[in-house]
Image (cartoon, rainbow, N blue to C red):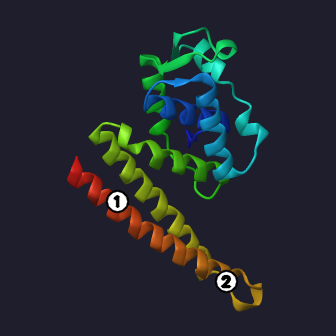
Amino acid sequence: MYADNTLTPREAVRLCALGTIAQGPMHYADLASSVRNFISRITGPSLDLLGTSIELLRFEGLVDSVDGAGMEDNALLTISEAGRAEFRHLMTAPLRPASDLSKLISALKFRFLHLLEPEDRIAQADLLVETSETGLNRLIDLRARITDEEGYVGEWLDQEIGRAESRLRWLEDLRERIALNA
């Protein structure tokens, strides 16, 4: 049986917030602004994605207040050990190809990949290559079944295949660079 363990929109926001704060302490308002700005530039404005509260992360013990109580006094926040574990769990989740959420999660993985341990970085690079190969193979398979009588979809697929091949080459190069630096 197939279990879909890809991230939900709520988890993508959590990943963005935890990864952002994992880079160093931030005040509540700065963290909320950083998360909102990053996500909205990848996916466009989305109430579904931006409805998650930073305060909830504090309540769940994923971030700690260094000074202050939270949103009301713009507390300085740091990531907790539980937050680091949750960050790793979210960062290592698989991708679902070809969705806006996957694009956001991919961007988050690239943004925070350097924060993982070397073996996790290599595993994530492998996952990114594998996901890209799977998507490319699906496009190639679909293209083989398309005829000229089906409108412009063949041309669109040719363009998508070219982009997917270029992305795969870039990911394979990135994987090699990560492995060399591990």
Q: Is residue 80 depicted above or below 1 in this figure?
A: above
Task: Check the picture and name the quadrant holding the N terminus.
Answer: top right
Are the residues flagged by discs 2 and 1 in contact, CB closer than 8 Å?
no
Quarter of the image for residue 88 reads top left
Q: Which mark is residue 174?
A: 1
- Decide if residue 141 is on the left or right side of residue 152: left
Q: CA distance from mark 2 to mark 1?
A: 30 Å
- Decide if residue 153 is on the left or right side of residue 61: right
Badge 1: few (under 14), some or many (20 or more) residues near its Cα, within 10 Å? some
Q: Which mark is residue 154?
A: 2
| Tag 1: amino acid | Leu
* Percent coordinates x, y for residue 117 in the rendering: 30, 36
* Percent coordinates x, y for residue 85 in the rendering: 43, 24
The residue nearer to you, when weighing 22 against 132, is: 22
Check the image and name the residue furthest to the bottom.
Answer: 148
Residue name at image x 58 percent, y 72 percent: 139
| Tag 2: amino acid | Gly
Q: Is residue 109 depicted above or below 22 in this figure?
A: below
- Decide which of tag 2 and tag 1 comes sooner along the chain: 2
